[in-house]
């Protein structure tokens, strides 16, 4: 069998994880990323169930442990910072809103990049990682995929993995326009790093719910900083796309009367170097593989940050698709990608579930609804109702789904880490 050459579009969690496993499996891999350098910062992400098992099989857990956030759980606060609901990690056996393995997205990306660099050093010539470039056009035939990049370079590859996020160019070029697969969920999300405000309980993810928004302050690895996490319930506005000034204006308007630590959050927002803002949308691609092109992570199956499973699905998807490609040979790639699509399907369905059902339930529109929500939280976290809450989290987690073993014919030892 001829040795394949795989192109990965996107150097986020899904792209780098897939590249790591492919290089370990002896497959020549090129990764292109439109950003000029790795993106730092980002919200905390969790590993649980199959995604944690994938990280363990990839040999990542020791390095993840060095970056791991040691969160105590989630606490709901009112406008004066008084707690009205507390969910310790151990209360839900690490399966609640805060898992027992939490890590900042940027730190996890660095763990993967370090592992990839080590793998490439052991296998010279198998990896090209190129920042500041992206796929401009592609055309596939039964024998390969011809690609042109915005840099003017071109190339021919045996497979293309689109790991380029919610607004995937690979998906648009190979599967269809974004509108065909994305469903707007009625709001936006924003994340950025900020100085830890005074009075925040050490180690607790503090959450304030107000009409039109959820405002969270989450512990960072450095106690001096925290992650601001905002969920806004507002209608779609195309003018917000790419306009940071307009995005900040919207946030300031919604949080103007939020109380608690909102002034500190708003003060830190303007200077935040890792400010992220995007619309909350679910991505549903019925078949994530088409010929020699496949989608991995948010490009093919995004449940939005509301699901809490995006990073987990990206790791599982990367592990499964690499396992199918290793040993497939250039001629067997279409069949390998079809197997990947079938094997990832159960994780896609379960990982998109939103624990509280919808954005409308999580973020009230009126003061009355917000007050009723606080009462409901107190009741649900009271002792008589805790068994029901535990069952709800268990039902919406992928903990019980077994991670597929490496595909038959692949070198399992090579990609195990």
Image (tube, rainbow, N blue to C red):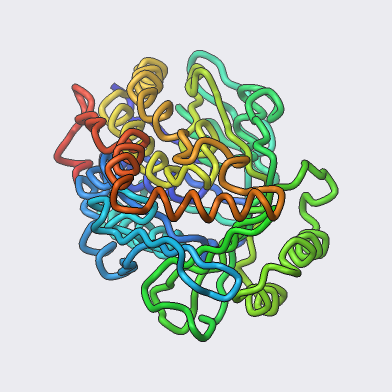
Residue sitting farthest toward the left: 413
User: Would you place residue 286 above or below residue 258 in this image?
Assistant: above
Locate residue 265: give its quadrant: bottom right
User: Would you place residue 208 above or below residue 335 in this image?
Assistant: below
Image position of 281 (left or right of 392): right
Instruction: Say if residue 37 shows up in the picture.
Output: no
Classify the position of the N terminus by image quarter.
top left
Locate residue 50: give its quadrant: top left
Image position of 199 (left or right of 46): right
What residue lies at 63% left-to-right and 72% top-to-bottom? 273
What residue lies at 63% left-to-right and 45% top-to-bottom? 134
Image position of 103 (left or right of 268): left
What residue lies at 44% left-to-right and 60% top-to-bottom? 44
What residue lies at 26% left-to-right and 49% top-to-bottom? 55
Instruction: Say if residue 234 shows up in the picture.
Output: yes
Locate residue 156: give its quadrant: top right
């Amino acid at each position: 069998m001829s040795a394949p050459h795989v192109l990965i579009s996107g150097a986020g969690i899904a792209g780098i994880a897939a590249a790591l496993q492919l290089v370990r499996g002896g497959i020549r891999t090129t990764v292109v990323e439109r950003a000029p350098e790795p993106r730092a910062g980002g919200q905390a992400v969790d590993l649980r169930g199959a995604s944690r098992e994938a990280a363990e099989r990839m040999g990542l857990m020791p390095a993840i442990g060095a970056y791991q956030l040691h969160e105590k759980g989630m606490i709901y606060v009112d406008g004066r910072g008084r707690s009205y609901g507390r969910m310790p990690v151990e209360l839900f056996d690490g399966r609640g809103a805060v898992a027992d393995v939490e890590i900042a997205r940027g730190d996890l990306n660095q763990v993967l990049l370090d592992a990839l660099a080590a793998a490439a050093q052991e296998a010279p010539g198998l990896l090209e990682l190129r920042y500041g470039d992206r796929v401009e056009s592609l055309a596939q035939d039964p024998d390969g995929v011809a690609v042109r990049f915005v840099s003017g370079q071109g190339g021919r590859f045996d497979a293309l993995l689109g790991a380029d996020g919610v607004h995937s160019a690979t998906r648009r070029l190979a599967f269809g326009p974004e509108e065909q697969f994305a469903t707007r969920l009625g709001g936006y999300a924003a994340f950025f790093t900020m100085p830890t405000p005074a009075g925040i309980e050490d180690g607790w993810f503090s959450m304030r719910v107000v009409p039109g928004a959820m405002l969270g302050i989450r512990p960072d690895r450095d106690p001096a900083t925290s992650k601001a996490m905002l969920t806004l319930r507002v209608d779609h506005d195309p003018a917000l796309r790419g306009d940071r000034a307009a995005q900040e204006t919207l946030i300031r308007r919604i949080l103007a009367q939020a109380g608690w630590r909102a002034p500190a959050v708003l003060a830190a927002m303007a200077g935040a170097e890792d400010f992220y803002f995007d619309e909350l949308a679910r991505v549903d691609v019925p078949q994530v593989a088409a010929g020699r092109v496949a989608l991995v992570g948010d490009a093919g199956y995004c449940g939005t940050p509301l699901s809490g499973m995006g990073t987990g699905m990206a790791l599982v998807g990367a592990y499964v698709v690499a396992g199918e490609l290793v040993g497939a040979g250039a001629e067997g790639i279409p069949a390998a990608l079809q197997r990947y699509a079938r094997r990832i399907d159960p994780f896609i369905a379960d990982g998109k579930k939103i624990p509280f059902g919808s954005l409308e339930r999580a973020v009230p529109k009126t003061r009355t609804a917000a007050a009723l929500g606080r009462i409901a939280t107190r009741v649900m976290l009271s002792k008589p109702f805790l068994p029901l809450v535990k069952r709800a989290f268990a039902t919406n987690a992928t903990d019980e789904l077994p991670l597929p073993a490496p595909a038959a014919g692949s070198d399992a030892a090579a990609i195990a880490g």
